[in-house]
Image (cartoon, helix red, strand yellow):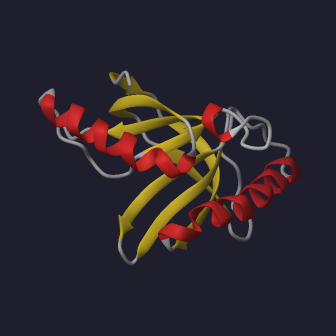
Amino acid sequence: MDVTIQRVPGQPTACVHAHASIGQIGETFREALPRVIHHVEEVGAVIAGPPYTRYLAYGPEGVDMEIGFPTVTEIPHNGDVAPAELPEVEAAIAVHEGPYERLGATYEAMEHWIREHGHVPAEGMWEIYLNDPGAVPPDQLRTEIVWPLKS
């Protein structure tokens, strides 16, 4: 796994804020994306990249997250679909290859790499899903992990 440190520019997004147990993340994601797509299309906005999940809080009692898409411009709020922004940050970035169930091992390896290289991980990391799990087998899934660093 290659990890790089990059300055990531801010990016407007359209998302659903959700809370789920760790075991419900996939189901919550699959339920949220169609609502986001529908709203973006309804307001005439443009999706600017693949879907993402940003983890705002992660613990034994569950996960608070944003699930959505980057957009070209800010969208209006409508029901449970809201405008948001992936922040401009300095981040450690790596690509996980394989099933989503193995993402935890990649996060552990990234955290070790971050600390070993003198950085401190911050909260609010996000995943960008580079290909479609309906189109490729699980061992070919590619997920970019963006882990913000403390200044």
Quadrant in which the C terminus is drawn: top left
Query: Relative to residue 79, is residue 149 depicted above or below?
Result: above
The residue furthest bottom is: 61
Let me know if residue 15 appears in the view. Answer: yes
In this picture, residue 151 sits left or right of residue 20:
left
The part of the image, by quadrant, that contains residue 128 is top right
Residue 105 in picture, x, y percent from top left? 37, 45
Q: Residue at x 74, y 34 (%)?
A: 136
Query: Relative to residue 42, is residue 139 depicted above or below?
Result: above
- Nearest to the observer: residue 94 or residue 8: 94
Q: Residue at x 84, y 55 (%)?
A: 38
Residue 12 in picture, x, y percent from top left? 58, 41
Residue 23 in picture, x, y percent from top left? 53, 69
The part of the image, by quadrant, that contains residue 107 is top left
Residue 37 in picture, x, y percent from top left? 80, 51
Quadrant in which the N terminus is drawn: top left
Tag count: 0
Q: Residue at x 52, y 46 (%)?
A: 85
Let me know if residue 73 appears in the view. Answer: no
- Nearest to the observer: residue 37 or residue 94: 94
Q: Residue at x 79, y 36 (%)?
A: 135
In this picture, residue 13 sits left or right of residue 109:
right
In this picture, residue 4 sits left or right of residue 27:
left
Query: Relative to residue 41, is residue 59 depicted above or below?
Result: below
